[in-house]
Amino acid sequence: MKKIILISIVLICSNGPSSTQADIKDPLPIQMESKYVTDRSLWGSLIFDRDKVSGSHQLIEDKRKIMDVIETYHRHWLDRRNKEVSELLDEEIIRFRDGRITYGLNDTLNRIVNESRGERPSGYASSMQLEIVDMQIHSEINFSIALYSIGIKGGARWEYSDLATVFQIFNKVDDKWKIIGHIENFRLDNPNVKKLPDTIPNRRSAFNFDFVYPVKDLHRAIDFYSPLLGSPEIVTPTSASFRAGDYLF
């Protein structure tokens, strides 16, 4: 599915007659209207309703253990507890995420260590919130698979959303389940996952992204940016708005 992104850049003159301190401190409409970016208790949270998990199982206890592994994996990933993540992975794991594939525990762990968890303000391991939904687990004696979606919220300065579809394979050794296969895709949609308003940037629908940059001399800034971006679409005594372009991807 093609996604439409409209990007605009707004210059705000900090010395203009109607400029206020609020213009500089809170330049993004999404930031000012978003509970997520202003409520830090939401950052790093993991939501998982186990009662809504479906599938087939030879043993109910195995279903519980696999759910434990999945929840613990994402909890440690959010918290950047890489050693604890490694303990959930099989030595022969194959992991495909965001267009890159890794083979074996060491290669996979090196990749996980460097993966983004969203913006990372001081004192926080992540500004993301993950919600695991629409999970199906099918298990045999020593082999199991799980398919589910992860609704993602994030942003410490402005709110955004994303959606991941995850397929995992588990191997049972000495009564302990470990992840031996992991495929994670960000290009699929899921009608069972709650969609956020169009004002919140996401990879599932068209969105507008406004970037606001404060300047001291508005006329000089317009002269500088016009050769790069074209003439501004809107000019006021204290601001100028440029359209950076319409992109399809």
Image (tube, rainbow, N blue to C red):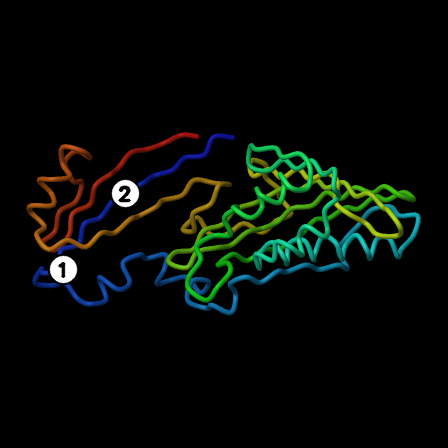
Mark 2: which amino acid? Ser
Inspect the image, locate mark 1, and give the three-letter code of the amino acid beneath it.
Answer: Ser
The answer to whether residue 193 is above or below residue 98 is below
Q: Tell me where residue 230 sits by quadrant.
A: top left
In x, y percent, where is residue 201? 43, 47
Residue 175 place in picture, x, y as percent: 88, 52
First in sequence, mark 2 or 1: give its number: 2
The residue carrying pointer 2 sits among few (fewer than 14), some (14 to 19) or many (20 or more) residues within 10 Å by Cα, namely some
Disc 1 secondary structure class: loop
**Where 247 falls versus 152 (above or below)?**
above
Secondary structure found at label 2? strand
Residue 180 versus residue 72 in the image, above or below? above
Q: Which residue is mark 1?
A: 14
Going 40% across and 51% down the picture, which residue do you hit? 199
Quarter in which the C terminus is drawn: top left
Spatial separation of the CA atoms under disc 2 and disc 1: 19 Å
Closer mark to the observer between disc 2 and disc 1: 1
Foreground residue among 2 and 37: 37
Residue 1 vs residue 150, the one in the foreground: 150
The residue at the point 14 percent across, 63 percent down is 19
Q: Label 2: which residue?
A: 8
